[in-house]
Image (cartoon, rainbow, N blue to C red):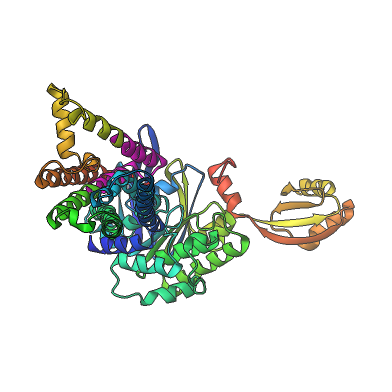
Amino acid sequence: MFKVLYADTRKLFFHKGLRECLVAVLLYLLAYVAVIKLVLFFVDGEFYADDVYTAYAGLAVLLISGCTLVSTVSDYDDGCIRNKLISGAGRPAVFLSALITGGTQAVLLSMAAFIESLILAGIFTKGGLMTMTVEELADYWLINTMACVAIAVFSTMLIMILGGKKVSYIVGIALAVGFNIFNMEVNDKLYPTQGSCTLSGFKLTLYNFYDRFVPYSYLSMRPHHSTLTYLTGAAGMIVVSVIIGMIIFNNKEIQ
Amino acid sequence: MEIVFKSENLCKRYGGFTALNDLNMEIPKGAIYGFVGKNGAGKTTLIRCLCGLQKPTAGSYELMGISWEDKNIIKSRQKMGAVVEAPAIYKDMTAKDNLIQQCLLLGLPDFKCVDELLKLVGLSDTGRKKAGKFSLGMRQRLGIAIALCGDPDFIILDEPTNGLDPQGIIEIRELIIKLNRERGITFLISSHILDELARMATHYGFIDKGHIVRQMSSEELQKECCKSVRMKVNDTGILAKVLEEKKIEYKILDRNIADVYAELVFSEIAKECDKAGCTIINMEEHDESLEAFYLSLLGGNENV
C-alpha cells in the first residue's frame, strides 16, 4: 500500500492538472479582490477579511471535482492504473492510494487558498486579520478543507468505479454543478432572507440532513453548525466512498 | 521443461459472449511465444486475465507455478512486466522520471537500473523531454523499459510493433531478441504482423474463437511449412503445361512468376521447359510464410 501511495504522491507533483488548478485558485482570489476593490472605489462600502476567506469556497466544488477528474481519468487513460495492478499491487492498495492522492490534492488547493487569503486580507481589507479570531479562522479552514477532502475522495471514487471513461467527466461535472444548484435551493428554503422556513415533514428532514451532513453544502454558506457536525459529515462521506468504492473496484473488470 | 504460464480449460464469458473457451496453453521458460489470432479471437482477454485485470469465469491458470486463486500470485506478478495495448506512461514526466516512478511502485531499494534501462532501450538522450511529446516508437520503448524494471522473468507485449515505422519495428525486434538471449527473459507477444513474429518467435500459439487451435515450436512450424521453388519464366502458361504433364503442384502468381511445390531436379525441369519453349529466368527456394500457415490452419483471410 505504501509503495503505491509513495509513487502516487510523487506523481502528483509532476501533474500539470494540479499545477494549473493551483494557478487557477491564486488567480481567482486575486481577481476577486481586484474586482471588489474596483467596485468599492465607485460605491461606498467596506471590504472585510471574511469576504476574502469565503471567496475560495464558491469555487471549491467545481475546482476540486475538475482537478481529481483530470488527474485520475488521465491515470486510467494512460494505462497507469492497469500498470499498477500488473506490477503486483493489490486492488485495495491501488484504490485507497488513488483516494488519498485525491484528498491530498484537495488539501494542497485549500492550503494555497488559505495562505493567499491571509495575505490578501492582511493587505487589502479593513482591519486586516483582526476581524476574525484565530480560533474562528482555524475552525473555518478546517471545515473548508475537510469538506474539500470529502468531495475529492467522493469524486475520485466515482472515477475509479466508472473506469476513467469519458462518462466520468460528465458525471463528475454534472454532480458538482447539480450540488451547487441544490445548495442554492436548500439555503433558500432553510434560511430564507425574508420570513421563516416553511418546510415540513420529509422535505425538511432531507434538507436539514443535507445541510448538516453532506459536505457539498458546507462550502455554500459560512459555518452555522458545530465543527463536530461538519467533521462528522465529511468523515461519513469519506467512509461511505471508501466502502462502496472498494466493493465495486475489487470486482471491476479493468480494460 | 520449466513452464512460466500454464492454463487449463480457461473460460471467460461476458454475458452471452464467450471470449475464452476451454483454453489450454503452456509457455516454456526462455521462450519468445508468438500469440497469433484474428481480432476478437481472445488474445487480449487472455492477457488481461493473466495480468489480473480480469477474473476467469471458469478453469484455472498458473503463473510461475502459482495458481491465480492463490494470494501469492501477486509475487509472481512482481516478476512480470507487461505492455498491454498501449504503454503505461505518465505524460507529464520525463523518461527517467517514469522509470523512477515504476521503481517506487515495485518498492526497489534504489534507482540504479534506471540509466541502464534508458540506455538499453535507446532513450538515454531524451533529457528533460516529457514522455507526452515522445513519438510512438519512443513511447513503445519506454513502455518496454518500464516493463523491464525490477528485472522481470516474464514480459507480455500486446501488439508491440503496432503503429511503428520500419526502423522502430526492427529496433523493438532486436531489443526483444537481445533480452531473451542475454537475460533469459520469457516473452509472450501477441502480434498481427506475422512475418515480423516469425523473425523472433521460438514458440507459437494459434488461437481462434477463444480456443488454442495449435501450439508448436518454431522448429515444428518450419517442418510443417511446405517449401516451394519460386520460378521466374518468360511465360507461366507454358510452364503450367509442363508441370501438369509431370503432375507437379504449382501456383501461378503472375505472367512470369510461379511457385512450384515439389523438390525439382533443376537440370531436368530446365530441359523440359526448353523443349516446350519456356525460358527460365531464375529459380530459388522459397519458404511458405507463417501467414500462409496461419491461413491454412485457421482458414479465411480476415483480420489476422
Quarter of the view holding residue A11: bottom left
Rendering coords of residue A205 (x, y %)? 13, 28
Pick whichever, B221 or B268, lies toward us: B221
Q: Residue at x 33, y 57 (%)?
A: A84
Question: Can residue A167 be found in the magenta stretch?
Answer: yes
Pick whichever, A223 or B2, lies toward us: A223
Pick whichever, A250 or A63, lies toward us: A63
Rendering coords of residue B295 (x, y %)? 58, 46
Q: Is residue A214 left or right of residue B162?
A: left
Q: Which residues are magenta?
A: A150-179
Q: Quadrant of the N terminus of chain A?
A: bottom left
Q: Is residue B239 above or below residue B117?
A: above
Q: Residue at x 77, y 61 (%)?
A: B283
Question: Can residue B300 be found in the magenta stretch?
Answer: no
Rendering coords of residue B128 (x, y %)? 48, 70
Q: Is residue B266 above or below residue B278?
A: below
Q: Is residue B164 above or below residue B250?
A: below
Q: Is residue A29 visible?
A: yes
**Chief secondary structure of the magenta span?**
helix
Q: Residue at x 24, y 57 (%)?
A: A128
Quarter of the view holding residue A248: top left
Quarter of the view holding residue A233: top left
Marks counted in the figure total 0
Q: Residue at x 28, y 51 (%)?
A: A52
Rendering coords of residue A183 (x, y %)? 25, 35
Q: Is residue B56 visible?
A: no
